[in-house]
Image (cartoon, helix red, strand yellow):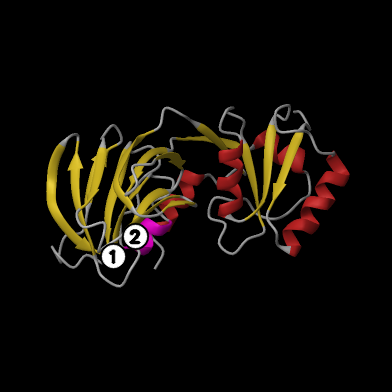
Amino acid sequence: MTSKFHFLTNASIEAERTYQTLVSSFGQTCIDEAEVIVAIGGDGTLLNALRKSEGRNIPVYGINKGSVGFLMNAPQLDNLVEKIEQAESVTIHPLSMDATDIHGNTFESIAFNEVSLLRQVRQAAKISISIDHVVRMDELICDGVLVATPAGSTAYNLSAHGPILPLKSEILALTPISAFRPRRWRGALLPSSAHIRFDILDPANRPVSATADEVEIRDVVSVEISQSPITKSLLFDQGHSLEERILKEQFTW
């Protein structure tokens, strides 16, 4: 097992201390030459590591020094090389987001957890939903709507009362956020091959932002979402795989 690690951390004091300890022990390899990225912090730090390695399918191992750290491993530092060598690898498929704003500017980004649309003002958003070029909902009046991957289904999606998706299900969750009309609509489960389009019906008076994980685009008029051809590998300590965590989460009250 190589010890060519690239360490990446957030700005917290505890994470920075761990970062300094590990760099002192193993050195710091530039990301282009590293064979493993070690992300120290919370889930946001891990998502940042995945984006920074977008051009390479370099595995990422997370050490939890954040608040939740659902995608991270326990913060013990002993036998790090052995832990990574014996870790279980999980392949995840992010979403690709193409957004257009009111000025005609276009933006592309990827999301490993979810793409979410949220109202920017006190008035509810009005959004039309199309699946594979067919309008399935003429008007959703809501605070927002999101599309979550299986890996991200236990994050914002779960907080919005969306379903938890098994990791290998090849399904996406389309979940409304505080839907006003139709009030009882709980969302939809879609095949991972689906092409999803949201059109904002009154962007001038009811502006909406689109966020791919942590990348936000303001004042959008349309957002298109599909599964990205990119794949990424996450490493988890033996017996604590992401699949096991997602399954366990379904029995947590």
Residue positioned 14% across, 55% down in the render: 139
Which residue matches tag 2? 118
Crowd class of label 1 (few under 14; some 14 to 19; many from 20; radius 10 Å): many
| Residue 157 colored in magenta in the image | yes
Residue 107 x, y percent position in the rendering: 41, 40
Residue 35 x, y percent position in the rendering: 70, 29
Q: Secondary structure at mark 1?
A: loop
Crowd class of label 2 (few under 14; some 14 to 19; many from 20; radius 10 Å): some
| Residue 204 colored in magenta in the image | no
Is residue 184 found left or right of 78 in the rendered image? Answer: left
Circle 1: residue type? Asp
Q: Residue 143 has which mark?
A: 1
Which of the 4 image quadrants contains residue 225?
A: top left
Which of the 4 image quadrants contains residue 108?
A: top left
Residue positioned 70% across, 62% down in the render: 12
Res. 204 in view: yes
Q: Earlier in the sequence, mark 1 or mark 2?
A: 2
Circle 2: residue type? Leu
Please say if the residues under marks 1 and 2 sit with CB atoms less than 8 Å apart.
Answer: yes
Towards the viewer: 71 or 246: 71
Up/down of 82 relative to 251, above or below: above
Q: Which residue extends farthest front?
A: 103
Q: Which residue extends farthest right?
A: 24
